Structures are given as structure tokens and as C-alpha cells.
């Protein structure tokens, strides 16, 4: 039986105009620049904890924000994928040519990655899973990551247990009657159980600003079940 496709409402917004706006958003203003730089530093720590993988799939790559650090991590095979063709085009044309040239680009859904099993050493997934509100959809995503990575996954999301999450919960309570929501704080206990259920062990986690920020990057390692006697 074939599984139903997972379609997230937020995925459709990344047309040409929105993709260009996304690139600008992270480049504009002192505070944005600072927080972008901090995010790049934290992501570099995650790559170090992942053991500087030799082959990496950046999914979703968005406008290629992380490409310079992925190149400087020393990886020899770099793939970048996104659901949105406009995002891929913005990434290709806005990053320095010598950086962009290092990446093989592909359009694919993270729920149905067009790669073989164990295709890369690591999947680098920034700012996607906090858009996935349904546990069953997260389970599909993590199962796909388990299939495609050989060793690790670096994944960022919003978690609870900090000031921003507390503020966000208060805001959501006020907004609750409006219905549509496209970003979610996932309790640490919940997501960590989901990682384990999907076959991953948590190697480390890295907070953007401990106790203050909701952003956390987890480094997960794939656990291979022993098959028993040969
Ligand atoms: C918030 S952006 C993050 C991009 C990048 N990782 C970053 O942090 O700059 C979310 C990205 O997810 C992509 N996206 C949305 N739905 C997707 C899906 N089902 N599979 C893969 N990418 C998806 C969008 O096109 C967009 O580029």
C-alpha cells in the first residue's frame, strides 16, 4: 500500500517573491545579522559534534544561508535540496559562485527524499520541523531521514523550557480562536521521545541562547538494530 503524500500548508508560500524576501530577511538589520551569525556558529558546533561528515544533504537549503559553513566544514560531497524551485534558484544565484559550485541541487520533499538508502553521512535540517504540527507527519519525516542518512542528522527546532517559549505559549493562548498556525514549539520531552522512536540516539544539543531562545539544534545518531545471529 502506498502512503499518502504529506503536504504542509506553509510549503506553498515559497514562490519567487517570498524566496527573495526570505534571503533579505536574514541579511537585514543589526539584530538579524547578529542572530544569523549566532545561528551559523551554533550550527558549526553541531557539525563538529557530528564528526565533520564527509557527505551532507542540506534539506531544506532555503536561500543557502548555511552553505559557507558547510563548505568550510571540509565535507567533500555536498547536496542541497528544497521543495521550492524558487528557493533553489535564489540560493544558486545569491551565494558566491565558488560556494554555490560546490553543491549539487535537487528539488525534493523532505517527506519523500529522492535519494537511495544511506545516501549521505549526515542530513542537515535547519528550520523545517518546527513547521510540522502533527506528530504523525514528524514521524514520517524522521523515518525518511533515518532511511537516507548513514550516520547523523543535525536538526533545528523550537523547544520549550526557555523564556521565548513561555512568551510564545501566552501569545498562542490569546490567538487560539484564529485557527491557522504554521510554527510550533515542541516540548523537549515529546520531540526527544520521537527521535528515539524513529531510531536515533541524541548525541548532543546546542541552544542558540540557553534559557532565553527557543532555537535548539540536536545532533542525532542513527542506531542500527543488531540483526542477531549471522
Ligand atoms: C524557514 S525556511 C528554512 C530554510 C533554511 N534551512 C534556512 O534555515 O535558512 C523553510 C524551507 O523549507 C522549504 N520546504 C517547505 N516544505 C518543504 C518540504 N515538504 N520538503 C522540503 N522543503 C520544504 C521551503 O521551501 C523553505 O525553503
Image: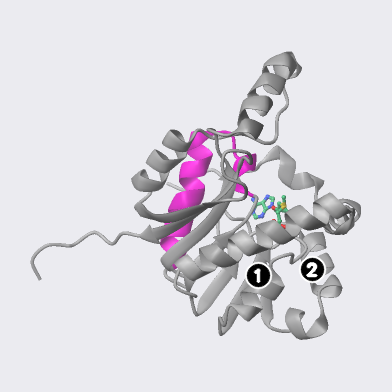
Give whichever of 80, 106 is nearer the camera: 80
- Is the residue marked by circle 2 packed among few (<14), some (14-19), or many (20+) residues within 10 Å? many
Question: Going by the image, does 103 lie left or right of 74?
Answer: right
Q: Which mark is residue 80?
A: 1
Q: Is residue 6 visible?
A: no
User: Residue 100, percent across and down?
Assistant: 75, 79
> For residue 203, what is the image quadrant?
bottom left
Residue 65 drawn in magenta:
no
Question: Going by the image, does 96 lie left or right of 153?
Answer: right
Residue positioned 63% across, 38% down in the render: 212
Q: In terms of secondary structure, what is the magenta stretch mainly?
A: helix
- Is the residue marked by circle 1 packed among few (<14), some (14-19), or many (20+) residues within 10 Å? many
Q: Is mark 1 within 8 Å of ligand 1?
A: no
Q: Which residue is mark 2?
A: 91
Taking the view exactly as shown, the residue that stands out farthest to the left is 229
> For residue 155, what is the image quadrant?
bottom right
Is tag 2's residue or tag 1's residue first in the polypeptide sequence?
1
Q: Is mark 2 within 8 Å of ligand 1?
A: no
Residue positioned 64% across, 63% down in the render: 41
Q: Is residue 154 above or below residue 80?
A: above
Q: Which residues are magenta?
A: 128-149
Residues tagged 2 and 1 counted as in contact (Cβ below 8 A): yes
Question: Going by the image, does 185 lie left or right of 116?
Answer: right
Q: Is residue 38 above or below residue 51?
A: above
Residue positioned 66% across, 41% down in the render: 8
Q: Which mark is residue 135?
A: none
Which colour scheme appears in the figure? Answer: one colour
Task: Estimate the spatial distance between the alpha carbons at disc 2 and disc 1, rounded to whole Å.
Answer: 9 Å
Question: Could you tell me which secondary element the residue under label 2 belongs to?
Answer: helix
Q: Is residue 184 above or below residue 125?
A: above
Residue positioned 48% across, 75% down in the render: 53
Give whichever of 61, 168 is nearer the camera: 168
Amino acid at each position: 500500500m502506498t502512503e499518502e503524500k504529506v503536504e504542509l500548508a506553509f510549503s506553498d508560500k515559497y514562490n519567487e517573491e517570498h524566496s527573495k524576501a526570505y534571503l533579505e530577511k536574514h541579511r537585514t538589520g543589526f539584530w538579524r545579522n547578529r542572530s544569523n551569525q549566532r545561528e551559523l556558529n551554533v550550527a558549526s558546533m553541531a557539525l563538529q559534534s557530528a564528526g565533520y561528515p564527509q557527505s551532507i544533504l542540506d534539506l531544506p537549503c532555503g536561500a543557502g544561508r548555511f552553505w559557507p559553513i558547510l563548505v568550510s566544514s571540509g565535507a567533500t560531497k555536498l547536496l542541497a535540496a528544497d521543495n521550492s524551485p524558487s528557493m533553489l534558484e535564489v540560493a544558486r544565484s545569491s551565494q558566491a559562485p565558488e560556494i554555490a559550485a560546490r553543491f549539487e541541487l535537487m528539488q525534493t520533499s523532505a517527506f519523500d527524499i529522492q535519494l537511495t538508502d544511506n545516501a549521505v553521512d549526515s542530513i542537515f535540517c535547519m528550520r523545517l520541523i518546527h513547521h510540522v504540527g502533527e506528530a504523525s507527519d514528524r514521524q514520517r519525516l524522521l523515518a525518511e531521514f533515518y532511511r537516507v542518512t548513514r550516520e547523523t542528522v543535525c536538526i533545528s527546532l523550537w523547544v520549550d523550557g526557555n523564556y521565548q517559549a513561555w512568551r510564545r505559549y501566552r501569545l498562542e493562548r490569546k490567538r487560539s480562536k484564529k485557527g491557522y498556525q504554521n510554527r510550533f514549539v515542541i516540548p523537549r520531552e515529546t520531540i526527544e521521545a520521537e527521535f528515539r522512536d524513529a531510531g536515533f540516539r541524541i548525541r548532543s544539543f546546542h541552544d542558540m541562547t540557553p534559557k532565553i531562545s527557543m532555537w535548539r539544534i540536536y545532533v542525532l545518531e542513527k542506531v542500527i538494530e543488531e540483526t542477531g545471529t549471522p
